[in-house]
Amino acid sequence: VLKSVNNSMQDVYVKEFVKLASSARADTGIELPASVEHYVVCLLAVHVDKPDFLPHSTFGESLLTMKPSTAKLLGDTCLFVTSVFPEYGINERYYTDIGRTAYTSIDRELFQVIGVHFDTVKTFTRSVVRGNHPKLIFD
């Protein structure tokens, strides 16, 4: 039962972040490829109920010990931190560089695009989360 409630809430989160992404697109003029925008929406929806998202070691140690199987998680964490908590920790550039490196180490087009255009994706994601949007109302 708990799993179905979590899935139902995830659907609600995705639906609301899709609305916010549409608004962010209009506000910023940033047009991401549909696959990247969808990825951003899902990334944000997954993190709503995920209070423990930071790496267990430092970001730098995580980068130095990164494996192909952990690169996505490190890139996602860096994108989330720089978008939602840009004032967190050392400085934004530090997390941006680590996120970019993590994503570009993954041999898939989606992650290559996010890595190469990390700053633009970060700006868009920040606008989704922090932009001047109306208060979320769950239908």
Image (cartoon, helix red, strand yellow):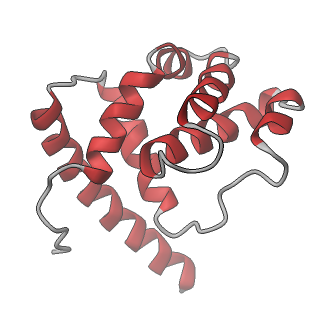
Q: Residue at x 54, y 36 (%)?
A: 92
Coordinates of residue 125 in the picture (x, y in percent): 35, 40
Q: Position of residue 138 (x, y in %)?
A: 20, 74
Q: Residue furthest bottom?
A: 1
User: x, y percentage for residue 119?
Assistant: 43, 23
Q: Is residue 51 left or right of residue 39?
A: right
Instruction: Say which quarter of the image contains residue 117.
Output: top left
Residue appearing at x 41%, y 33% in the figure: 122
Please state, as top left, top right, bottom left or bottom right, where the C terminus lies in the image. bottom left
From the top left corner, tell me how far across and down residue 95 is, in percent. 61, 34
Q: Please tell me whether residue 36 is drawn above or below residue 59 in the rendered image.
A: above
> In the picture provided, is 59 more to the left or to the right than 129?
right
Q: Residue furthest right?
A: 65
Residue appearing at x 55%, y 22% in the figure:
111
Instruction: Please determine whether, in this image, residue 2 is positioned above or below residue 40.
Output: below
On the image, which quarter does residue 31 sit in?
Answer: top left
Q: Is residue 17 left or right of residue 8?
A: left
Tally of numbered discs:
0
Comparing 85 with 6, the one in front is 85
